[in-house]
Amino acid sequence: MINKTKAIVLKRMDFRETSLICTFLTQDFGKVKGILKGIRADSKKFASSVEPFSVNEIIYYPVKTGELHLVSAAELEENFTNIRNDLNLMNIANYLLDLTDSLLAVEDKNTDIYKLLFKSLDALNNQKDATKVQTIFQIRALFYSGFKPHLDSCVSCSNQLDFQVKFSNAYGGLLCSKCMQKDKQSRSIFRGTIATIMHIEKNNFDTLMNMGLHPQIKKELKIILSNFIEFHLEKRLKTQKVINQIDKRINETVKL
């Protein structure tokens, strides 16, 4: 059996002297790992250099045992050149790849996340608001992968939420005033931030790119989402560390 599909390159690594091992998010088969034999020795062997976040049409032979398939062809369809010429956009794009790779299991088909990743990269390539793209991607990727925070009622007692609520990473959502003491690490959250998350979950990407974000809510979303993702993945993404370091330098420069 031979599989042919569109695929976004999530990551790549050299293998021996001449080959590459790549992780792809495919349109039809989910996250797939494959080896491209001889691509580094003969650049003309494939019609693509399979750079991270490029879109390719790939052909691969699934193996019966293990998860490393043989990729026999890769033809470049979209390289997102504008992203590659802007360091900030590159950092955000790499974060999207990193989060996608961490959220999805191998060969767990998720067409929604494939479409979301493609639209997000396309928006970055067209130099849309990179922070907004990242925020929308985080919320919708969590939604599509089943990791979304519980915001409709108290995550502990299931009762309707009262005026005073807190957000708990450990419980995975909002705690009411009676339950918030169950998690000493829970934090206050603006009602506008809750409403924004729910709005992003329910609307399509193109509509959301025209959405305005209040600076205070944008700041809180950044903190809430990065902490929530780190808690549930049980690690801080390397790409998130890079973004944090750059933000810190920018803030220090502004203060000067």
Image: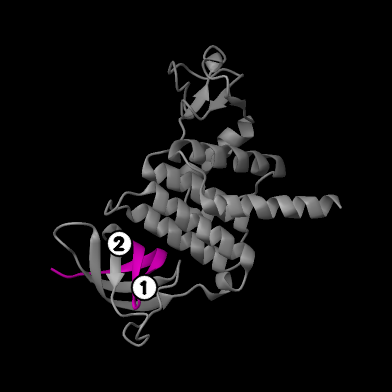
Residue 180, compared with residue 46, is above or below; it is above
Give the alpha-carbon distance from disc 1 to disc 2, as whole Å.
14 Å
Q: Is residue 117 left or right of residue 220?
A: left
Asked whether 246 or 76 is in front, the reply is 246
Asked whether 99 or 124 is in front, the reply is 99
- Residue 207 part of the magenta segment: no
Q: What residue type is labelled 2?
A: Lys
- Residue 13 part of the magenta segment: yes
What colour scheme does the image use?
A: one colour
Residue 182, compared with residue 43, is above or below; it is above
Give how far across and how far down residue 170 sits, in percent. Answer: 48, 27
Q: Which mark is residue 56?
A: 1
The stretch of residues the image draws in magenta is 1-27
In front: mark 1 or mark 2?
Answer: 2
For residue 208, say whether it is visible: no
Give how far across and how far down residue 9 sits, in percent. Answer: 40, 66
Q: Residues within 10 Å of mark 1 (few under 14, many from 20)?
A: many
| Residue at (32% x, 68% y) in the render | 6
Give how far across and how far down residue 32 sits, in percent. Answer: 29, 60
Q: Is mark 1 on a helix, strand or loop?
A: strand
Q: Which mark is residue 33?
A: 2
